[in-house]
Image: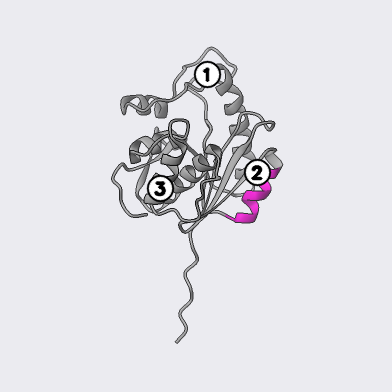
Amino acid sequence: MLVAKRKAMVVVGIDLAASPHRPTGVCVLSGLRTKTHIASSDDEILRFVEKARPELVPIDAPLSLPPGRKTIHDRSGEHFRECDLELRRRGIRFFPITLGPMRLLTERGMALRSKMEIQGIRVAECYPGAAQDLWEIPRQHKDRKGLLAGLQDLGVRGLNESMTGDELDAVTAALVGRWFLLGKGEMLGGRDGIIVPFSARVTA
């Protein structure tokens, strides 16, 4: 009797740059097999995502605004979102989204999210640095090779030493998305919050 092969879960992680003139790391995680790519424009990112047909796209960029702000340039509202405050309560370092360069990233992230959701693609905000802290593996700017080794220890296959820090952060984002879909993660701050893994090192 033939048994149908179970389709691997596909998640696309994106380490988004604030500008299309800087490299954006993109990762397709199929099961635990990774394939990475460096993209530039929004159109290139969207084509990559559409081709992968993922169940979830975790993006390393702010995808929502603090309370009371209509735009990221509106200075009348709060500086922090509930998910930001929760990161701070947990001792995880991050850049406030109202900080200069973060405003451009927020604008691009929110626009990209809208384009994907119009196409029926499920999107979530992710912060690779938070996941790396929770998994007790190095952040890429501290120890790129250590981050690569840590992701390998977590079961990711297909990694290699030529991968950039942007690609490894995209891999991290994709793995967080996988853990979240498997019930081994949570969303901080409610519906528009940040997804993070549980800290326990459970086989993914």
- Highlighted magenta segment, given as a residue range: 44-53
Q: Position of residue 20 (x, y in %)?
A: 68, 33
Q: Is residue 44 above or below residue 189?
A: below
The Cα–Cα distance between marks 1 and 2, rounded to whole angstroms, is 25 Å
The Cα–Cα distance between marks 1 and 3, rounded to whole angstroms, is 27 Å
Residues at discs 1 and 3 in contact (Cβ within 8 Å): no
Q: Which residue has dot 3 on it? A: 180
Q: Is residue 46 above or below residue 143?
A: below
Mark 1 or mark 2, whichever is nearer to me: 2
Q: What kind of residue is marked 1?
A: Thr
Q: Is residue 103 above or below residue 29?
A: above
- Which quadrant of the structure image shows residue 108? top right
Q: Residues within 10 Å of mark 3 (few under 14, many from 20)?
A: some
Q: Secondary structure at mark 2?
A: helix
Identify the disc placed on residue 45.
Answer: 2
- Please, which residue is most extreme toward the top here? 76
Coloration mode:
one colour
Q: Which residue has dot 1 on it? A: 98
Q: Position of residue 156 (x, y in %)?
A: 44, 53
Q: What kind of residue is marked 2?
A: Ile
